[in-house]
Image (cartoon, grey):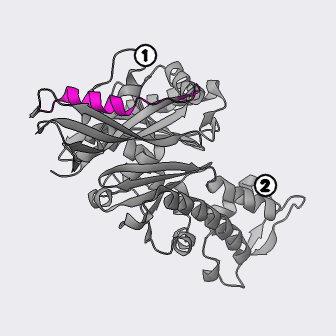
Amino acid sequence: MNPNLAAVLDLGSTKVTCLIASNEGSRRTKVLALKHQSWDCIKKGVIVDHAAATEAIRQVVSEAAQVADAEVTELVVSISGAHLEGLTGRGMKPIVPRSRQITHQDVLEVVNHSRSMILASDRELIQAIPREFKVDGVRDVHRPIGQTGGRLEVTTFLVSAQSSIIQGVERAIQGAGYAVEQMIFSGLASAMGVCKEGDFVSGVAVIDLGGDSTDVAILVNGSIAYAATVPVGSNSITSDVAQLLQTIPEEAERLKLRYGTAEPERVSEQEIVDVVQLGHDDARPLLRRVLAEIIESRVREIATLCCQHIDKSGFGQVLSGGIVLTGKGSKLPGVDKPFDQVAKHLRVRVAHPEGFGSNIDAGDATAIGLAVYALQCYEELSPATGANGWRERVKSLFTILKN
């Protein structure tokens, strides 16, 4: 593909999205095509219907390629699910002869050294992102290439995944006629889609409220420092409404989207909504506040689980940018209020991708971020040749920051 073009695929729980974008220079990413297709092929990050997934991928990419008038051969793909794990790797390399300039090859070798850890036989590393380089003990070096020194060190954020799940995604994409250029943790992609340059520097926790799960990505000092997936998402809200109001999922989803809010205190105690319940042909009246209380309870649980990860990360006290909510679930009115109440010491705001067109909303944050990552992040290392080449690709987030 054209190096100034990126074709990305966001494998969501309720829809698959293909976005094609171009690099317009000056850190600008232009969306050329965006196509969605509803599907029910993936659960908790696992493809459960390969034939249907392959056909959906083939169709949505073909439609986007036609709109963009582009030939697509490779895809940058989101990956999510509780099977993912964020790890910290550390590498060291002596520079010989001492005090010569550090080269690309030195960076490749020190990052590869940071990846040399023993994983369980059913897991593999799929992403390596430098967090910090040190040259002769001097910290916070973002671009060591060209500097002089005798010792190069790196702290790397590594993402590991369950091999069978990764291979399943690869099979579906290859079956559709495409190759995987890179797999990116969807929480990181969402952060790339909605965060400003200052957020990367000041520190921020980006929470993507998806359907089956919620991704947490913590950015500190210009790079990603922690990642996790909470196995609860906006679909759980729909399930709660269906169960507690004794209605079918489609009716529960309608109620959530049309009348839902996570702020029951802002709903009048007299306001009524009509609900078609199981075993009844006619709609029955229900206090809207009851619906809001059901929603607020589940959102509060999600907020609590996410904040537990923020506390676990150890970075909670340095997140000057607070918490940023995005993803499809963030469009629910009042969704930030339970997070405000749970994360009392952190500012909470809802964000969506900006500057990419009026048809882009919070539900497209991951797809936008995949494109930004592919086009705007400097590639420190070229992928190795061979079947596992994309797994060995390394990009630095530091280059999205101004020099």
Secondary structure found at label 1: loop
Residue 64 visible, this angle: yes
Question: Does 254 sit above or below residue 210?
Answer: below
- Does the magenta run of residues contain 214? no
Q: Residue at x 67, y 72 (%)?
A: 292
Question: How far across and how far down the image is residue 238, in percent?
Answer: 69, 57
Residue 246's tag is none
Q: Amino acid at mark 2?
A: Ile
Residue 387's tag is 1
Question: How far across and how far down the image is residue 200, in percent?
Answer: 31, 56
Kindly indicate the quadrant of the structure image that contains residue 127: top left
Secondary structure found at label 2: loop
Question: How far across and how far down the image is residue 321, in percent?
Answer: 36, 66
Residue 248's tag is 2
Residue bounds of the magenta highlight? 101-123
Mark nearest the camera among 2 and 1 is: 1
Question: How far across and how far down the image is residue 252, in percent?
Answer: 72, 59
> What's the CA distance linking mark 2 and mark 1?
46 Å
Kindly indicate the quadrant of the structure image that contains residue 281: bottom right
Image quadrant where one finds the N terminus: top left
Kindly indicate the quadrant of the structure image that contains residue 93: top left
Q: Residue at x 69, y 73 (%)?
A: 293
Question: Does 70 sit above or below residue 148?
Answer: above
| Foreground of the two, 120 or 173 | 120
| Foreground of the two, 135 or 369 | 135
- Does the magenta run of residues contain 121? yes
User: Label 1 crowding class (10 Å Cα cut-off): few <14, some 14-19, many 20+?
Assistant: few
Question: Does 352 sit above or below residue 322?
Answer: above
How many numbered circles does the render carry? 2
